[in-house]
Amino acid sequence: MHGDMRSGYNHEGMHGDVRHSHMHGDMKKEFMKKMFLKEMMGYLSDDDKKKLIAAKLDIKISMAEKKLEMMQEKKKLVAMKLDMNESLTEQKIDFLKMMKDMIK
């Protein structure tokens, strides 16, 4: 009814969609990396574990700081764009008023 259900093979789901029973490449790499790190942590001394955790936290802090900088830069760009749009709208209003005065 549902096609070939053997492990590792494609099979058709209940609604006709093809399902895969394997991990995608990126997910598999991340899983393997986590398993490797978990295994390596067992061999490290408590002091080395603390150093590794501190290094990971430094990386996370650095990434968060970069994200904050990018957000602040984006905020500046958006503000500049809004100022420019405001200026253009003011110019348009002035131009339309001038046109109105000309036809009076």
Image (tube, rainbow, N blue to C red):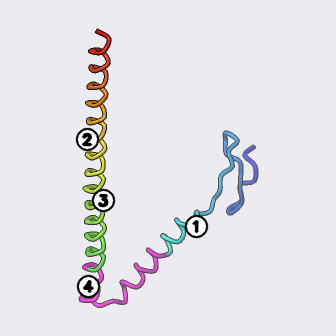
Residue 10: percent from the left, percent from the top?
71, 56
- How packed mark 2 is, by other alpha carbons closer than 10 Å (few <14, some 14-19, many 20 or more), is few
> Which amino acid does the dot numbered 2 rest on?
Asp
Residue at point 36% right, 85% down? 42
The numbered dot on residue 25 is 1
Q: Quadrant of residue 101?
A: top left
Residue 58: percent from the left, percent from the top?
26, 75
Indicate the secondary structure of the residue bearing disc 4. Answer: helix
Q: Earlier in the sequence, mark 3 or mark 4?
A: 4
- Tag 4 residue: 51
- Tag 2 residue: 83
Closer to the eye: label 2 or 3: 2
Closer to the eye: label 3 or 1: 3
Distance between the alpha carbons at the discs numbered 1 and 4: 30 Å
Q: Height in image: 41 above or below 76? A: below
Indicate the secondary structure of the residue bearing disc 1. Answer: helix
Magenta segment, which residues? 33-54
